[in-house]
Image (cartoon, rainbow, N blue to C red):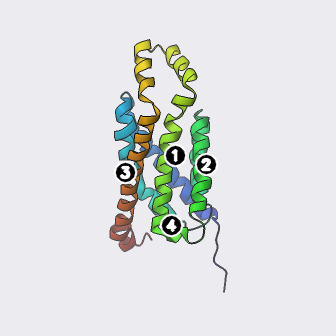
Amino acid sequence: MNKEKKWIGFKEIVLIALLTVLGIVIQLVISMPFAAVPHLMMFIAVAIIMVVCGPIYVLMLNKSRRLGTVFLFGGLQALYYVIIGQAFIAVTYLLFGIIGECIMLGDGYANPKRIGLSYILYSACYILGSYLPYIFLADQYIENMSAMGMSEQSINAMMNLYTPFTILLAVISSCIFASIGAYVGYRMMKKHFNPAGVM
């Protein structure tokens, strides 16, 4: 009897890459209408993204129940942000990939609760990577926004939004909607994917 393969192979890598790209495209499309309004971007856009991308994440981890799936997903996200010049966000996603993979050790890829937990962790990293730079790299952001012609009043209003308190609220909100997204993903699997033979 052949020993069951534990690590991702070429087939899984292709699947993870395709679903990761799909998730990134969805994030961009949803974010665009909210880009000019930071409050809406931080809460409404992220909430929609977490719910919509939840089924994609759940499907990916159920189709590729192999060690390395979460790490590769985080690594591909990190690579994307390196390419567009957002190194801080890339580091956050690498950390997610490592911690998320640890969550999935053992029977994690067959455990809906662990899959949901890893997606909630992803949602927290999504917020932290996107908004913590406004605190730790504030001077650089202010300089960049000034160079783009933003008024001092607009810059101050934007920077005052990104406080530890509002970021914490955004993390909590994101985690709540990520749990909804994971739940929706499992409901869709039972109702649509499994009967259609996708799983």
Residue type beneath disc 2: Leu
- 138 lies above or below 119: above
Q: Secondary structure at mark 4?
A: helix
Label 4: few (<14), some (14–19) or many (≥20) C-alpha neighbours in 10 Å: some
Tell me the number on the disc at residue 63: 4
* Label 2–label 3 contact, CB within 8 A: no
Name the quadrant of the N terminus: bottom right
- For marks 1 and 4, the one nearer the N-term is 4
Graded by Cα atoms within 10 Å as few (under 14), some (14 to 19) or many (20 or more), the crowding at tag 3 reads: many
Q: Earlier in the sequence, mark 4 or mark 2?
A: 4
> Where does the image place residue 171, in percent across and percent down from the top left?
44, 44
Q: Where is mark 1, residue-wise?
A: 125
Q: CA distance from mark 1 to mark 3?
A: 14 Å
Q: Which mark is residue 177?
A: 3
Task: Point out residue 78 in the picture as x, y percentages from the top left corner.
Answer: 59, 44
> In percent of the image, x 32 and y 69: which residue is there?
191
**How far is disc 2 from disc 1 in space, using C-alphas?**
8 Å
Q: Amino acid at mark 4?
A: Lys
Along the viewing direction, whichever of 113 and 21 lies nearer the viewer: 113
Front tag of 4 and 3: 3
Q: Is residue 1 above or below residue 121?
A: below
Secondary element at tag 3: helix
Residue type at mark 1 is Cys
Q: Quadrant of residue 42?
A: top left
Which residue shows up at 38% across the image and 51% down it? Answer: 176
For the residues labelled 4 and 3, the Cα–Cα distance comes to 23 Å
List x then y, in percent, for residue 148.
49, 16
Compared to residue 133, the image places residue 104 above or below, namely below
Q: Quadrant of residue 133?
A: top right
Within-10-Å neighbours for mark 2: few <14, some 14–19, many 20+: some
Any mark on residue 95, and which?
Answer: 2
Q: Amino acid at mark 3?
A: Phe
